[in-house]
Image (cartoon, helix red, strand yellow):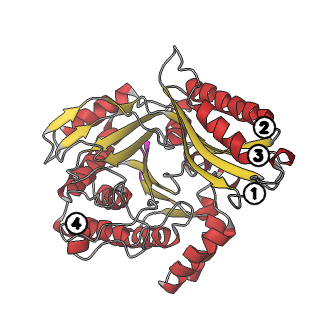
């Protein structure tokens, strides 16, 4: 990688870090990606509705939550044509580089940030060096800023390399809320992809360490359940009400009693509850937000079915109605061993790589599995790669940061894997 590209990748990572945006509201991030793609000179740029299957989007916020972020992007100088193309939360980009005959390689990275206030501590490097989040209450606490920068650096490096074939980069919105993977997988842009790479930095792997392909990502579903009862005076006539708060509380308690399954690991959690009006009023409406996970897609669906059954039973017990809603989900899909092994072989020759781990259980969830499944169902290969980086604190914490030397490692690994794939099938 040239000195110029190396510096640009670092600067891009810091620019993305300064302006984090949550899922389906990545208007400024999308625009910056498009500007970089135009500078690099790719052959096709699909934005918004062109890059997504609109009806397959999940967890899309209401317009009242989208518009403030769109207006913020407008005030920051984002071009009107890009604001129009990303209207109604249609963020995301697919870039295509054509370099002659050869296989089609895809790379997927994620755009969105997390709802979390970034640290202002003097020993937090983004704060000390002037690239802390400017959007209070939001930050790149999971490394998506690094993923974006690596992808753009890899694209520029591949363009200048001996790669022969087609290189597509999928800049996917709404990963943190598992909302964008299916929409991008169903867009049609993956139908000719022979190989798909995805990546994540860190996850307790230090700088210089590579995991060539993960296995056992947990299948996951986010759900809400709204309990509806009848209000009444809690002191004078509690018997005249139907207590939605009691129904929700019963459901929450019993959710954790869902039996484990002999086929493998399952998880359930209720993370948020909202409802009621006052301490002296029988609550008429209460909503809980929950998630279920499973070692396989079938185990996730088992746990989701059981959670819905628990909610219906709790509602009936307290003379209430309940409406469960699936907000978003993702399946389990493993990295293909052949592509994983090829990535591992390439990694040993990348400057800065000190250790290569062939595979590792992921243990969390990721909606890139929709894209991986699409490619592998079509006869292709997919691998989810971990790029080690020293991070002073865990992901999803206010002081999360990365070792920026890992950016160069990631760009080199992606670009050299692309060149190797253009020479032979795994």
Q: CA distance from mark 2 to mark 3?
A: 6 Å
Residue 160 versus residue 210: which sits nearer the camera? 210
Compared with 1, 121 (above or below) is below
Which residue corresponds to the image point at 55% horizontal and 74% vertical from the top-left? 69
The residue labelled by disc 3 is 243
The residue at which mark 4 appears reads as 124
Horizontal side of residue 273 vs 245, given as left or right = left
Identify which residue is drawn at 48% across, 19% down: 264
Discs 4/3, front: 3
Above or below, 31 against 248 in this view is: below
Residue at x 70%, y 56% (from the top left corner): 276
**Are dots 4 and 2 in contact, CB under 8 Å?**
no
Q: Secondary structure at mark 3?
A: loop
Mark in the foreground, 4 or 2:
2
Residue 259, image x and y in percent?
57, 20
Location of the N terminus by quadrant is: bottom left
| Residue 281: assigned label | 1
The quadrant in which residue 154 appears is: bottom left
């Amino acid at each position: 990688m040239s000195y110029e590209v190396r510096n640009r990748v670092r600067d891009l990572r810091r620019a993305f870090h300064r302006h984090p945006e949550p899922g389906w509201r990545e208007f400024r991030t999308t625009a910056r990606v498009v500007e970089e793609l135009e500078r690099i000179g790719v052959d096709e740029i699909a934005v918004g509705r062109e890059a997504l299957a609109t009806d397959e989007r999940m967890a899309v916020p209401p317009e009242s939550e989208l518009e403030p972020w769109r207006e913020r992007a407008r005030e920051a100088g984002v071009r009107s044509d890009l604001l129009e193309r990303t209207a109604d939360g249609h963020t995301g980009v697919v870039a295509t580089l054509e370099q002659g005959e050869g296989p089609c390689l895809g790379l997927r990275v994620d755009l969105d940030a997390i709802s979390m206030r970034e640290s202002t501590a003097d020993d937090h490097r983004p704060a000390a060096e002037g690239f802390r989040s400017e959007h209070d209450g939001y930050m790149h606490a999971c490394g998506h800023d690094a993923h974006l920068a690596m992808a753009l650096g890899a694209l520029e490096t591949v363009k200048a390399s001996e790669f022969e074939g087609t290189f597509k980069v999928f800049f996917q919105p709404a990963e943190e809320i598992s909302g964008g993977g299916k929409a991008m997988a169903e867009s049609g842009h993956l139908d000719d992809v022979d190989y798909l790479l995805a990546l994540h930095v860190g996850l307790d792997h230090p700088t210089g360490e590579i995991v060539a392909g993960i296995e056992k990502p947990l299948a996951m579903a986010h759900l809400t359940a709204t309990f509806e009862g009848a209000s009444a005076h809690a002191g004078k006539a509690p018997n005249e009400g139907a207590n939605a708060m009691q129904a929700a509380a019963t459901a929450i308690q019993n959710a954790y009693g869902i039996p484990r399954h002999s086929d493998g690991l399952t998880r359930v959690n209720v993370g948020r509850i909202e409802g009621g009006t006052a301490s002296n009023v029988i609550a008429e409406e209460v909503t809980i937000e929950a998630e279920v996970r499973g070692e396989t897609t079938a185990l996730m669906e088992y746990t989701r079915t059981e959670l819905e059954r628990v909610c219906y039973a709790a509602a009936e017990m307290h003379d209430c109605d309940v409406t469960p809603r699936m907000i978003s989900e993702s399946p389990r899909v493993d990295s293909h061993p052949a592509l994983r092994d090829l990535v591992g072989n390439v990694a040993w020759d990348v400057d800065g790589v000190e250790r290569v781990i062939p595979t590792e259980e992921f243990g969390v969830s990721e909606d890139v599995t929709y894209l991986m499944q699409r490619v592998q169902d079509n006869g292709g290969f997919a691998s989810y790669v971990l790029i080690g980086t020293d991070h002073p604190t865990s992901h999803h914490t206010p002081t999360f940061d990365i070792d920026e030397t890992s950016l160069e490692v990631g760009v080199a690994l992606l670009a050299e894997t692309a060149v190797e794939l253009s020479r032979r099938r795994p």
